[in-house]
Image (spheres, rainbow, N blue to C red):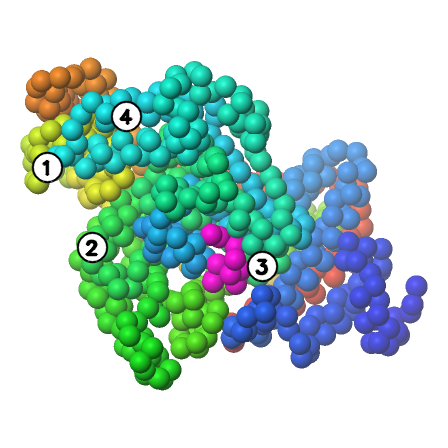
Amino acid sequence: MPSTSDTGKNYKYRVKAIPFHCLYKFKANEKLRLLHFYILKLGKRKHDPWCESNQGEPAVKRPCGTKRSTEKEAVILNHVKNTIGSIAAKLYDQDDTRLSTFLKNKIKNLETEKKELVGVFGKTGAGKSSLINAVIEEKMLLPSGSVDACTSVMIKVESNRYNEKYELVIEFITPEEWEDELGLLRCMVDNGIQENHDDDDNDDDDYHDAVDKLTALYEEEWREKSPEQLMEPKYFKEIPEFLLLKQKTLGFATARDLSDYITKYTRNASIKGRNKSIKKWYWPIVKSVTVRVPRNNFLQNVTLVDLPGNGDRNKSRDTMWKEIIGNCSAVWVVTEINRAAADKESWEILKNVCNLIGNGGECQHIHIICTKSDDISHSYDNSIADVQSLILKRNKAAKDGVIEELNKLTKIKKHFSYDSIKVFTVSSKEFFTNKHLSPENTEIPRLQEFLQNLNDCHSETIHYVSGARGILSLMHGASLRQENGKNKEVREALDKNLSLQTESVINEMNKIHAAFEKHLQEGVEKSKSSCKEILKSALYPKGKSGRGFCSQLKKAVENGGIWKPKKGKEINLNMKLTSRLTDSIDKLFRETFPNERQCDPFNGAINTFTLGTDGLKQTYKDLELQLLFLKSEEDLLKANLSKSTRKQKKTVYTSLIRTIEKSMQDCYNEAVVFSGSGTLQNLRETIEKHVFGLKNNMFEHAKIVMLIELRELMEEILRRLERTMKEATEVSLGTDYQSIPDVSAEFELVQKLYDELLQNSQNRDHF
């Protein structure tokens, strides 16, 4: 082993030669010098691959200093994880004691994986696939460009962390679900043949949708076969995974190879637009597709999800769709620039998902992305400078028009602040060709910068390193501890502080609960008084013919009060009935449970909670290491509580509509049997009778359920606060001495890396 007086040149050689997972074999001071030298070299490199395109296209200007800063953090995090891994191995070799078991659990809980979801919506031909390809700089990844084809299933695009291939993972619906759907499709076809659809475009859409699905998978054989016969294994020879309830995984050397293969699993093409070499199209039975891209800087901790705009009639696909929507950190609504402001379909998508992504979700950012900004008529007659000027002028006009339309969407404003909504005008084609626009003017780099910010794992890194530092401080302090009577004093002071701080959190939560009860009661009264108005708008919509609306309403009651047509507005009776309740609490809910990461839930009550360990360290210096651990434990707990609250609050918010759905289910079961002459009138009368009969109890019950779930969330947070900090105090300041490994060197190393990380954070903020 070289001495500590080795030159920098020798250390450089050793860093290149030694894998990080082997560094634990070196002494602490040697590891630290190795790591610091490597970090120093990162900061001095002239050639930075993070600042280049990996596809041979023009480089995108990025803040290279910030990227190097992120790279340094990755090195620090990797080394701290290796250090903690070696400590965990030592602990597992020892007998279980209360302290060792506690430490093992703490080490296990340090590991968290951050994955941000970006949902991408847009009508057929809007350029979603091209946009995704451009943003991640993979020109040939997702198939695009055909107006005769649309993406019919959910496509998740993420990084491949396992190998260097382009991977395709296909998840199917179950055979049972497909067999049930076959019966429904057959029924739609039979009804379509028997009836005239001249006055009902949606019924016509349903007929053609059913024919498209059946023909895609079975060609023309379905016309002479029963649903049972269409489930025979011979139809699924190419995809045996479907019948075996397995995923289908394939690897490809290039993006183009994957793109050529993925089409039949994701794209619904018209007869004239279909690839003649593809005989069977499997998208009707696909639940979702995951595309994994190797070596992609924009997808390190981000998944882009190309989403069908209106959910799905298949229940498992619709459930997955809603779950993904609720977990999205950002939503991109993609529309063509030449009709962005007037694109009603895009605005309908946004309004339909508003509750799911806002108070009922985790979305922090809404981006309206106007595509094809380079599409200028007669531009071939102008110079490059003139074309660029025309494009930029229209971009500004398009943004102004979209912002004007956004200002009219009052429902969106209840869920999102003005700052969280942005408009982009992009050209995916120009980003790759640079014919008329610089990369910056295509605005693709702005979206890339946004993804890089989502990728930024600094908060997760600091939490892990801080937690590791806390664990090592506890272990080091325990090995040095000598009983001098001060432990009891400190525990009593901490217990007192815990009681006072918990009481403060309880008081704030009680105020919040009372505010919700007040607002919900107002919503109950408005729901009761406006029942007639709500039912009139839902059951007697303007501009709907009797025959056409009857068919849609019948489908809605068959589907639990919801019907999603291929085009136009969805029917959602449950949402209509819940609207006055949600309106009453939307503003309060957003203030109490903000989606923005920089804002804390419960009016900051969790974030202000503290045991006051910093003050105690001044008085009890002999217990400084144990108090350092408790401060680390407190910080990690508050961060985890804020994160879990953002997820649990979704259940609280959606409790209103779930309760209404349950209250209405008997009504739907009764109405579903109507057919023939007078069906529409019978449907209307049945729904009206049910709602008027239950209105004095149904809305009140929804209020009570939400308040109960809100109280349960509050109590769970309080339990975690008290239990976690009480256990941490007892273990760290317990009087019984317990033998644990000597970690003095590891603690010193991680402490210095922690300081390095904080300094790195300041440098990042400077950029």
In front: label 2 or label 1: 1
CB-based contact (under 8 Å), mark 4 and mark 3? no
Quadrant of residue 576 in the image?
top left
Amino acid on which the number 1 mark rests in the picture: Lys
Amino acid on which the number 4 mark rests in the picture: Met
CB-based contact (under 8 Å), mark 1 and mark 4? no
Amino acid on which the number 2 mark rests in the picture: Leu
Q: Decide if residue 295 is in sight here.
A: yes
- State the CA–CA distance, disc 3 to disc 1: 49 Å
Q: Which residues are magenta?
A: 133-143
- State the CA–CA distance, disc 4 to disc 3: 44 Å
Quadrant of residue 754 in the image?
bottom right
- State the CA–CA distance, disc 1 to disc 4: 21 Å
Q: Which residue is mark 1?
A: 544
Of callouts 4 and 3, which one flags the residue occurring earlier in the amino acid sequence?
4
Amino acid on which the number 3 mark rests in the picture: Asn
Relative to residue 677, is residue 45 depicted above or below? below
Relative depth, front residue between 256 and 699: 256
- State the CA–CA distance, disc 3 to disc 2: 36 Å
